[in-house]
Amino acid sequence: MHISDGVLSMQVLIGGAALTAGGTAIGLKKMDYDKIPKVGLMASAFFVASLIHVPLGPSNVHLILNGIIGIILGWSAFPAILVALLLQALLFQFGGLTVLGVNTFNMAFPAVIIYLLFSKGIKSNKLSMSIASSFLSGFLAVFFAGIFTAFSLVFTGEEFLNVAKLILVAHIPIMCIEGVVTVLIVGFLKKVKPEILELNGNFKRKKIRERRAAI
Amino acid sequence: MKIKNGIVIFIFIISFLLSFLFFNIAFAHKVSIFAYSEGGMIYTESYFPDGSPVVNGEIQVYDSSNKLILKGRTDNKGIYNFKIPKIDDLKIVLLASMGHRAEFVLKKGDISTIDKENGNLKNESISKSKIGEISVQNKIGVNKTSDNEALSMGNVTADEIRKIVSEEVAKELKPIARGIAKLEENKPGPTEIIGGIGYIIGLIGITMFFLAKKRG
C-alpha cells in the first residue's frame, strides 16, 4: 500500500508530512526509556513484514502488521513506522522519500486508532473477548490503512469509491491474515511476556521503578 | 480450560499456515516498466520485481514538453505496444492502481529513426534480400580502393548497410538490454534486510544514550 513518488499532489504531500510530524512528536513524547527497545523491535518487524507479499489483481498486497504495532506501542507507532518506512524507501525503493509523510500517516494513524479502540479489550482476562478484539485490531488496522490510502489518492483524480473498493477488496485476504497473525502474537505474548502488552503487573513494576528513580 | 486454549491456538496456527498455501509469497513491492523501440513500434513491458506482469495497468506517454500524447492499458502479460507517435524524448509512465507508479524514459537517440523513415516492417524482407547482394558485392569490391565507391557501384550505398547493420545489432541486443534493465532492479536481499535492522538497532542505541543522559 506504499504510494510511489510522483503520484500525489503537493498539497496532499505537505498535509501528510504535517500530520506525521504531529503524530511523531506525540509518539516521541510518550516514549520513555523502557519503551525504546520495544519501539525498535516493532520498527524492525514492520520493516521486514512488507517483504511478505500476496499478488492480487494488477497490484499486490503484503503483510503490514500495523494492528499489533498499535496495540503494543500506542502513539509511539508513529516514530516506529516512520523509521521503518524511511529505511524501506532508502534500501528497497518502496514508496519514496517525498511520500514518506503520507505513507507514514496512512499506516500509523490506524495503529493509533486500534490502540484507542481495542487495547482494553485485548488486555481483558476473558479469552473470547481478547481473541475477538485482537482479530478485529489486525483486521481493522489494514481496513483503515486502505481507507486512508484511498483518501489520499482521491486528490489525484481517482474516484474515491472506486479506489477504496479496489484497495479494500484486494486487501480482504490480508485483513484476515493480519487478524489471525495478531491473535497469535497477542496469545503468545500474553503467555510468554505479558509485560510487553503492559498488562497490570507491568504498571505496578513501572511505578515502583519510578519511585526508586525519584529517590 | 487450558486444553481449550491449546485447541483454539492450534486451530489458529493451522488456519494461518493454510492461508499461506493459497497465495504465492513473492518478494515484490514496486512496479517496473521497460521499453524499447523496433520496426516503427515501441514495445513496453511492465512487471513487478518478481517478474509477474502488471495486468491492466495504465500506460501514459509524455513527450519532452511533458504533454500527454498517448494512453493505453497493459494486457494480461503486462505488455503494451504502440506505433512511435513522435521522435522525441518519450517519458513512459506506468500507473498500476493503488498509487503504484513507475516511469521509463526512452531517449530520442534510442528510438530507431531508420524504421520510422522507411515506414513499415516490410523493409525487413527487403533488407534481408539485400544482405545477399552485399556479400556478393563485397567480394567484387575487394579489388577497389574506396569502399564507398565500390558499394555504391553495386546498388548498395553505405547508408543502406549502416541501416541493415544497426537493425540487426538492435535485434541482437534487445534481450541483453532487457536483461540489464532487469538486473538494475535491486531486489531487497539479505544485505538490505540485515542492514535495515542494523540501522534500527543503531537508532535505539542513540535514543537510549541521550535519554539515559537526560535521566542521569
Image (tube, rainbow, N blue to C red):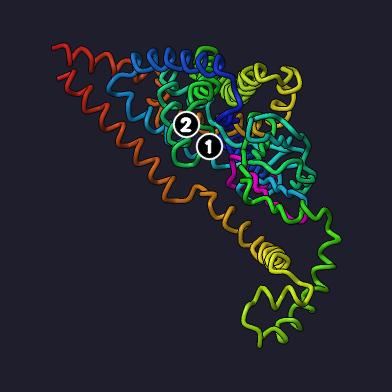
Residue B194 versus residue B35: which sits nearer the camera?
A: B35
Residue A199 lies, in percent from the top left, at 41, 20
Tag 1 secondary structure: loop
- What range is drawn magenta here? B22-39
The answer for how far apart the CA atoms under marks 1 and 2 are is: 8 Å
**Is residue B204 at least partly visible in the picture?**
yes
Name the residue: 48% across, 50% down.
B189
Q: Is residue A55 above or below residue A110?
A: below
The quarter holding residue B196 reads top left
Dot 2, crowdedness within 10 Å: few (<14), some or many (≥20)? many
Q: Amino acid at mark 2?
A: Leu
Q: Earlier in the sequence, mark 1 or mark 2?
A: 2
Q: Is residue A128 visible?
A: no
Q: Position of residue B153 (x, y in %)?
A: 75, 76
Q: Report which quarter residue A40 is drawn in.
A: top left
Residue B69 against residue B24 in the figure, above or below: above
Indicate the quadrant containing the C terminus of chain B: top left, top right, bottom left or bottom right.
top left
SS of the residue at dot 2? Answer: helix
Q: Provide the residue designation for mark 1.
A: A94
Q: Residues within 10 Å of mark 1 (few under 14, many from 20)?
A: many
- Residue A85's tag is 2
Q: Is residue B24 above or below residue B180?
A: above
| The N terminus of chain B lies in quadrant | top right
> Which SS type dominates the magenta stretch?
loop
